[in-house]
Image: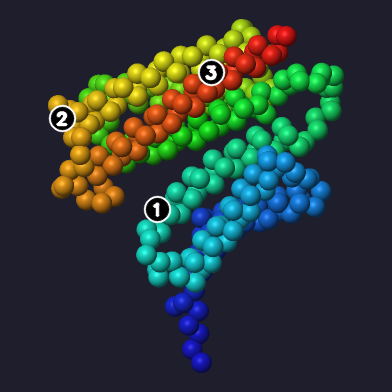
Amino acid sequence: MENSGGTYLNMAAVTSRVGVARLLQAVFGCTTFSLVAHRGGFNAAYGTFCMAVWCFCFAVTIFIITCEFTRLHNCLSISWGNFTAAFAMLATLLSITTAVIYPLNFVQFSCHPIGAKPGRVTSYMATVSGLLKIVQAFVACIIFGALVNDSQYDKYVARQWCVAVYSFCFILTVVVVSFNVTGRTATLRCPFERFVAIYTFVAVLMYVSASVIWPVFCFDRKYGSPHRPYQCSKGKCPWDSQVVIAVFTYVNLVLYIADLAYSQRIRFVSHH
């Protein structure tokens, strides 16, 4: 009998750099949710969300490895490269989210007890405002993905202003999250709550401008088209990317408004 393993099995799926990385992802993912299920605990909504993320990422990673190893992905009616790239981006964002949420809610840091009083805000990232920061960064990544997908953002200066808005707000959001996770908020020269409130207010104003400018300079007849051009091919139409950016601009605007309102509520409660 001839050995047909080289024909039907793709060894590069587990021996290449990407393949080894996926195997390590599967091993570490399995280890993570096994330890949490056995000893860590994952009660309440936050814990259930983290466990769901780990199980989802593990299952899809195993699915990808299996399909590539057996070459079954050639039988699927999807763009396999786009699917794996999109999943890698999604898994990265979800993993970052759980890396922030789980330690803040389930890990006891007892090196420096602070004697917190009931109702006092002790961890910013465990609040609604902190979680909104993660979602804002996630939505911004979707916007960036649409921008680089032939959105023609460089056609007008007004569109470039919108790109500057998305980039500025995303960078500061990442800075806020990083300062909280690393515990370096005390190094700021101004109170952290004031810095976040001012930044969020500025972000709301900037997103308001982007929510007006982007649709005008993309869908007004003078600058773009209010309807999808007939000559646009499916999946490669700048108009589609422009619609995605417009929709998620409004999504992030709502998130920043909610963030501003809740951050003011936290500040009010913490001072009474």
Residue at (29% x, 50% y) in the render:
235
Report x, y in % for residue 140. Answer: 44, 32
Mark 2 nearby-residue class (10 Å; few <14, some 14–19, many ≥20):
few
Q: Judge depth for marks 2 and 1 and give the one in front.
A: 2
The type of residue carrying mark 1 is Asn
Q: Would you identify the image quadrant in which residue 104 lies?
A: top right
The type of residue carrying mark 3 is Leu
Res 7 label: none
Report x, y in % for residue 59. Answer: 59, 58
Q: Which residue is mark 3?
A: 260
Side of 146 where 70 appears, left or right: right
Q: Which residue is mark 2?
A: 221
Q: Which residue is mark 1?
A: 82
Contact flag, marks 2 and 3 (Cβ < 8 Å): no
Real-space Cα distance between discs 3 and 1? Answer: 36 Å
Side of 212 where 231 appears, left or right: left
Residue at (40% x, 56% y) in the render:
81
Q: Is residue 3 above or below residue 202?
A: below
Contact flag, marks 2 and 1 (Cβ < 8 Å): no
Residue at (84% x, 26% y) in the render:
111
Real-space Cα distance between discs 2 and 3? Answer: 35 Å
- In the current view of this chain or complex, which residue is farthest to the bottom? 1
Report x, y in % for residue 216. Answer: 24, 25
Mark found first going from the N terminus, 2 or 3: 2
Mark found first going from the N terminus, 3 or 1: 1
Q: Judge depth for marks 3 and 1 and give the one in front.
A: 3
